[in-house]
Amino acid sequence: MKICCIGAGYVGGPTMAVIALKCPSVEVAVVDISVKRIAAWNSNRLPIYEPGLYDIVAQCRGRNLSFSTDVEKHVSEADIVFISVNTPTKTFGLGAGKAADLTYWESAARTIADVSTSDKIVVEKSTVPVRTGESLKKILTHNSKGINYQILSNPEFLAEGTAVQDLLRPDRVLIGGLETPEGKKAAQVLKDVYAHWVPEDRIITINLWSAELSKLVANAYLAQRISSINSISALCEATGADVSEVARAVGKDSRVGPMYLNASFGFGGSAFIKDILSLVYICKCNGLTDVAEYWKQVLKINDFQKSRFVKRVISSMFNTVVGKKIAVLGFAFKKDTGDTRDTPVIDVCKGLLDDKATLSIYDPQVSEEQLIYDLTMQKLDWDRSSSNQLLILSPTEMKQVHTARNAYEAAEGAHGVCILNDWDEFRELDYRKIYEAMCKPAFIFDGRNVVDPEKLRAIGFIVYSIGKPL
Ligand code: NAD
Ligand code: UGA
């Protein structure tokens, strides 16, 4: 059997590497239009940082796993084609700032239609709006070559930073197909691939539209939990309750469960914001305004939380941060990844720079080049009806931004330290050394509750942690 995956990104690369590892008899080719990305997959420095991934790629590459820019060849030879291209939020035109941009998805679908000469199972791996399978069918069959295509939805649930573990031991694998004999047969073929390592009771086959929608709903539910606990963190700060204690107490109820109850200064990443926006847009397109408004609140609380954090930093430091150096620890949207797409750290940086602070930023996996790119690129304000592009930072503001090679360098001479992601190394820093090198009074603002506030207070810091007594 030959599998081809279009899109060698955070999903295509790790997913196909694990399929190749677990199915030695299957030939897996990952293709992409980006020459740079494919070259990196074929090198010793993979294009994405993901714990455990390099070993798997090194083991399978050249055996039954290949990375190539020859999209046509590998697509035409494949029995199963996965579409795993990016589906970001539209930045222009109809649905700008809300709808999923299906340009890359459509171009991949058209490639399959153009180059195929044999029957194929085409699998939607990308996160797409519900009923995209219908459009896929239309594109694939538009040139009526008489080829039989079976379309499946097989959304991915891996999280960055834990991709390999998530793929090796998934909670579930979802396969959506049409309820026709051919549709069921195709679903079985894909099920057999996963059955090489995933227990059968974890492989769920459902209808195509349910599978497409389940992916958006799964992300919306996870994000909703974070916004719920984040909203409660504000109430904790106002009342003297401790959000970690509340989360533990509530999460012990097996009907609620303990996961995704870590209060933070806001969630980010390439998924939650874009997928909730997509869900909201789909609801609106179906005339369900109240449902759309309900899910929009998850994003509104996220914005509230980010601006609440910035306000806390500024008000704590005597209402002015003009010219003050603030160390920013963490720039990626979470630990164990270098991915900065939709990182909430950008909003905090922007807020502090608006008040004329000077920033020294450190993240173990984000290069200076990437950081400057992210801070200067244009961004859509999702809550506006117009399609306004906002410049994240002006050239003047950029003069106030510096990068540091480590946390100690970032904190040297700083008035405040903001901990903005949860890299393990931030838990283990020598905070006494940091305190000694800082201006006094020395402030720590922990946006992820990674440090023990009492221990830091004993050193002499003034500490603010999300949802905890001051
Ligand atoms: P990505 O941007 O990292 O990778 C997508 C790749 O597709 C890029 O390398 C791009 O060059 C390539 N591409 C685009 N159009 C192409 C074409 N026509 N032909 C060949 N290659 C093409 O994106 P990603 O993070 O891997 O996400 C892919 C999809 O999976 C998205 O829909 C996303 O929502 C979903 N998803 C992502 C994650 C995650 O953790 N990143 C998890 C689950 C689902
Ligand atoms: C998320 C989902 O967890 C995956 O299941 C899904 O496949 C993926 O989106 C996707 O569709 O792309 P990811 O965005 O990689 O994965 O990372 P998460 O671990 O879910 O974290 C997202 C954000 O929420 C991060 O900023 C994280 O710090 C924040 N978070 C997470 C919290 O603030 N509190 C928590 O309790 C958990």
Image (tube, rainbow, N blue to C red):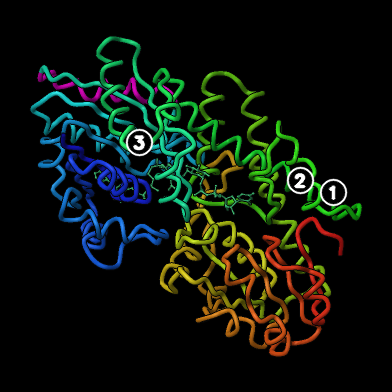
Q: Is residue 463 left or right of residue 177?
A: right
The residue to which callout 3 is attached is: 125
Q: Secondary structure at mark 3?
A: loop
The residue to which callout 2 is attached is: 231
Q: Secondary structure at mark 1?
A: helix
The quadrant in which residue 123 appears is top left
Q: Secondary structure at mark 2?
A: helix
Q: Amino acid at mark 2?
A: Ser
- x, y percent for residue 116: 12, 30
Q: Which residues are magenta?
A: 130-145
Q: Amino acid at mark 1?
A: Leu
Count every numbered label the image shows and give the total.
3
Quadrant where the image shows the C terminus: bottom right
Q: Is mark 3 within 8 Å of ligand 1?
A: yes
Position above or below: 316 against 285: below
Label 1 packing within 10 angstroms: few (<14), some (14-19), many (20+): some
